[in-house]
Amino acid sequence: DCLLHTPAFFEPDLLAEMSQPQAHIIPLIYLPRSTVEHTIAESVQRSSEIQIFGTDNKFWNSVAPPVDELRPGLEADEIAVSQSLATELQAAVGDELTLRFARTSGVPPDSPLGHRDDTTINLPRQTIIAILPDVGVGGLSFASSQTVPRNVFCNVSTLQEALECGAKVNAAVTLHTLSHSGKSDIEAAGNKPDGDIPIVHTGQQEQQLCLR
């Protein structure tokens, strides 16, 4: 699989020896089964079973097709959300969301960061700067599903600070380089994707996510 997720956090340097000329491994933080809230006037729109990805500018400069407005990366308290999630929450660019996710391995329960109890961390006032189509990176998922994934992408440092995990991550994505023809090296070689080739699940269709 092109997506690696572990129960414990690890140093990104551990991924260096796994990279290959045709594929690069980009570390990230993955927080499944999260909850997102959007307050509209006196009403609170809430979505559960959300995937939160903590990314850096290397991720956004690597994916193809590119997301031009995210090439510089996400700053602290900036987020990008998938179209399906934005529609469900009735949210638009400029709106603020509150993210709620489980305290994961390695996070002390008495940390003052993020308003939390023993099991949950809350990150309020996360501003939407981009809404991503559900096809492509916006539909990134760790599992094949008949439903379209609902995703939030954050600055990885924002999540690392809230989780108090230093520079550690708990996941990674493998992105394939593109040949001069505009195809991935695997596609250019005429090989069909199989179980050994990383595939990004994007809801009802599978799509290879390639490095530019």
Image (tube, rainbow, N blue to C red):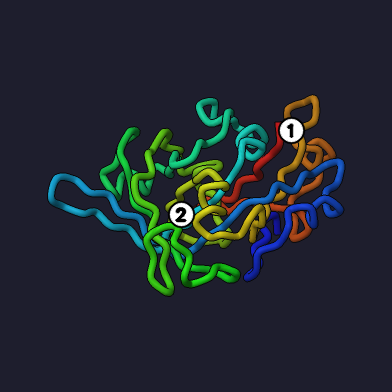
Residue displayed at 16% across by 52% down:
43
Horizontally, residue 196 falls left or right of residue 45, namely right
* Viewer-side residue, 106 vs 19: 106
Q: Earlier in the sequence, mark 2 or mark 1?
A: 2
**x and y, in percent, of residue 199 in the image:** 67, 52
Quarter of the picture containing the C terminus is: top right
**x and y, in percent, of residue 90 in the image:** 26, 44
Horizontally, residue 80 falls left or right of residue 212, namely left
Between marks 2 and 1, how big is the CA–CA gap?
A: 25 Å
In the rendered image, the vertical position of residue 104 relative to residue 146, given as above or below: below
Residue displayed at 33% across by 33% down:
94
* Viewer-side residue, 5 vs 206: 5
Reading the image, the residue beneath label 1 is 183
Q: Secondary structure at mark 1?
A: loop
Q: Secondary structure at mark 2?
A: loop
**x and y, in percent, of residue 99 in the image:** 38, 54
Q: Nearer the viewer, mark 2 or mark 1?
A: 2
Which mark is on residue 196? none
- Three-letter residue code for mark 2: Pro
Reading the image, the residue beneath label 2 is 149
- Three-letter residue code for mark 1: Lys
* Viewer-side residue, 42 vs 198: 42
In the rendered image, the vertical position of residue 37 relative to residue 6, given as above or below: above
